[in-house]
Image: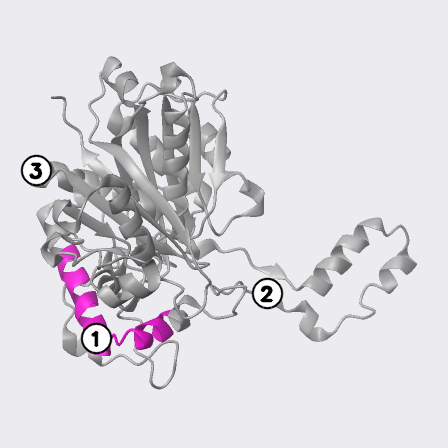
Amino acid sequence: MSESSKNREAVFIDGGRTPFLRSQTEFKKLTSFDLGRIAVSGLISKSMLEEELVDHIWYGNVIQDINTSNVAREISIAAGLPDSIPATTVSMACISSNVALTSAVNAIATGNIHCSIVGGVEVMSDIPIRFRKRFRQKLLESQKYRSFSDWLGFFKGLRPSDLLPEIPSISEYSTGETMGQSCDKMAAKFGVTREEQDAFALRSHLRAAKATDGGQIEKEIIPVSVHNGNKVVQKDNGVRGDSTMEKLSSLRPAFVKPHGTVTAGNASFLTDGASAALVMEKEFALSHGYTPKAVIRNYKYVARRPDDELLIGPALAVPQVLDEMNLSMEDVDVFEFHEAFAGQMVTVLKALASDDFAKNRLGRERAAGDVPMDKLNVYGGSLSIGHPFAATGIRLVTTAANRLIDEGGRYALIAACAAGGQGHAMVIERFSSE
């Protein structure tokens, strides 16, 4: 690293997102390309960005369309950015846009770039459905056919079942288990009750409903025009402000039947949505008239075997990132954690507060500590707002930065779990010109 690139700080200028909608609702006719373009275009307008300042785009996408395999590049061009800007699509399950952000942070730190647009998109209404492998092989072989007799043998060796579509399963390739099944196992292992999960889910919905009514969420939203311009979507549609413990407790287990504790009511739902954020090198931002919201201070990625603790990642990452910053839980003013499942959230919170977990699993003398509930996800979370896989990370950082400003805090802690037994934690600090 050169002398000129030392002490280069990456700052978060602003972020935004489309409304997060339940799959198969208002966004069902759109693609990841469509929503990503809208999010990036909206960010450009919102931040009054001089497009020629952008050096690189990193954009997350998990369920990818083969027609837009590098969707970041297609989004960049469609959003009207100069065609000379390189664009990279990244994928790390539910923390894909976190990777997009930290890729930009790293490039800024080394002096490779000054400015980047980052984000992520997922449209679960438009997952790719393909033929089974045996039939796919036949179709590929058929490209070499030259005569009618070649075609006569096309179905030789095929079974009727080979012609059925192969619908993707949201499960771990290594274990065959869905996240819901893994969460049920983890919740049982850590003694998390059904009542605790339902209570946490209810909290998320009620807080999201209050923040929606109070306008706190509105300032993050980039409206989306649908139905040929006849309707503009401006709100998330998964928030249930009328939810009650009675309603949640009446739902049956969704994954481990009949005795599981994870239900449709205490799990995040399949969601369509996109996010985008603008990050710059601090001095570059100030010299071009931009006022940052926060400074990206530190981050960690972790991984473990994806079995009965598939979603424990934040409990491993948070202590590491706090230690490296010489911070304690008491020093953190804003907590924004990804809520994949209520059971996952309660488990992580218990693990972070457990001395036994700290000693036996982390090699620490004592627990990282309790996360104050009055500082955690005060505008709701993924359980209520929704979780478009690759878009959630930037939503978390955007909300955390806005909360730091609104609440006058200094440090925010962002954390998320991800498929594959992975996890992430990040500390940001409210920007001060002093």
Relative height, residue 110 to residue 59 (above, below): above
Q: Position of residue 45 (x, y in %)?
A: 28, 27
Q: What residue sits 47% from the left and 46% below the top?
A: 91
Q: Position of residue 329 (x, y in %)?
A: 16, 50
Q: Residue furthest bottom?
A: 258
Q: Earlier in the sequence, mark 2 or mark 1?
A: 2
Q: Is residue 57 visible?
A: yes
Q: Residue furthest front?
A: 365
What residue sits right under mark 1 in the picture?
248
Relative height, residue 289 to residue 273 (above, below): above
**Looking at this view, is 357 or 56 the one in front?**
357
Relative height, residue 336 to residue 36 (above, below): below
Relative height, residue 398 to residue 166 (above, below): above
Q: Which residues are magenta?
A: 183-208
Secondary structure under tag 2 reads strand
Disc 2 vs disc 3: which is toward the camera? 3
For marks 2 and 1, give the CA distance.
Answer: 33 Å
Q: What residue sits 53% from the left and 38% below the top?
A: 70
Q: Is residue 233 visible?
A: no
- Left or right of residue 338: residue 77: right
Q: How is the image coloured?
A: one colour
Q: Is residue 189 magenta?
A: yes
For marks 3 and 1, give the CA distance.
Answer: 35 Å
Q: Position of residue 65 (x, y in %)?
A: 53, 48
Q: Earlier in the sequence, mark 2 or mark 3?
A: 2
Instruction: Write down the quadrant of residue 395 in the picture.
Output: top left
Secondary structure under tag 1 reads helix
- The label shown at residue 163 is none
What residue sits right under mark 2 in the picture?
166
- The label shown at residue 408 is 3
